[in-house]
Image: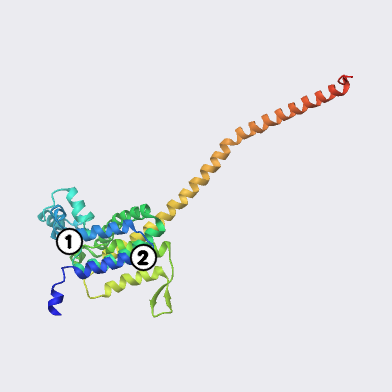
Amino acid sequence: MGSGMSTLPPNFVFKGALATLLVLQLARGRRPLATAALLAANALAFYRPGAIGRILPEPELVGFNPQLLLNERYRDYLQQLGFLGLGELLVEAFLLPPFYHVDEGHLLSNMAFLLSMGARLEASMGTAEFASMTTALLGLSRGIAVLLSKGLMILLGHDVAACYEYSSVGFSGVIFGMEAVLAWSYGHPVVLIGRWTFVPAKYAVWAHLFVLRALPRKTNFLGHLSGLLAGIVYHYCWRLMKRCSSINRNATTTIRSMALLPTRFAQKLLSSVTTTAAAAGDDDRHRRDEGYPHPRVV
């Protein structure tokens, strides 16, 4: 049996598990196109096949660290890594880190959560809106992480920077944002302990955040918290835009109705005058007919 196990192709377990999850989603009648595209992007960035490996930067050069923008010492470190301009900084320190992962276990756990929540959100929101939401979460989570890091530096001093000397990678921050959107927008009770213990989805998201923090493996609490807050911000901004859109539609309808009032009044007035004139003409013809009867033909 040992020799039989050694003949398995590399990454067999991961690819089989991911394919099984995707087949289960398809069997439920879901066609999560944007979610499948995100899965493919993460897998390609991790395995780097063929020409993709030559195009993408090396994993050692990719990582998100808020201190890179807040501390001069980290800017010098950034220059030592070979970042030459703002474009490379945006790509290698902001855009690519969510699609890079430390190992296959890290990738599999993130992709399992992404496939589960992404398929549900995409089915509810539609592919286009889901894709725009994911893009917004990518930017919001990064911006909130920088703001939180700056706040910690102001409150605790520059010594707190030592806690964030490592760079983070992985899609978990965006996944926390999706989980928050799912809980706040489509909240349902979730089973947390046993069979009959229900916890509101909003509280379950926070519990998930702190449970991951308590685990012995190294996790980026700041990145997860930033993603969760990004999801909450997106939810309320989305509700505000929907409400403003509804108000705009109602206001447009009201303004259109008010603008058409003179036209409608003129139409009613013209119709009334025409009806009165027609009635007067009919009455006049009726009186003439009574005074001058038509001759009879014998």
Q: Residues within 10 Å of mark 2 (few under 14, many from 20)?
A: few
* Camera-nearest residue between 247 and 162: 247
Amino acid carrying label 2: it is: Ala
Q: Residue 37's x, y, as percent?
A: 28, 56
Q: Residues within 10 Å of mark 1 (few under 14, many from 20)?
A: few
Q: Is residue 289 left or right of residue 94?
A: right
Q: Report which residue position mark 2 lands on.
A: 27
* Camera-nearest residue between 26 and 255: 26
Residue drawn 58% across the image and 36% down it: 260
Q: Which of the two discs, 2 and 1, labels the residue nearer the N terminus?
A: 2
Which element is circle 2 on? helix
Q: Is residue 243 left or right of residue 219?
A: right
* Camera-nearest residue between 130 and 255: 130
Q: Residue 31's x, y, as percent?
A: 35, 59
Which element is circle 1 on? helix
Q: Is residue 11 left or right of residue 285?
A: left
On the question of residue 82 being in view, the answer is yes
Residue drawn 41% across the image and 59% down it: 124
Can you say which quadrant of the picture contains the C terminus? top right
Amino acid carrying label 1: it is: Tyr
Q: How is the image coloured?
A: rainbow
Residue drawn 15% across the image and 76% down it: 4
Residue drawn 13% across the image and 60% down it: 60
Q: Report which residue position mark 1 lands on.
A: 47
For the residues marked 2 and 1, what is the alpha-carbon distance in whole angstroms? 27 Å
Can you say which quadrant of the picture contains the N terminus? bottom left
Q: Residue 51's x, y, as percent?
A: 14, 53
- Give the number of the mark in front: 2 or 1: 2
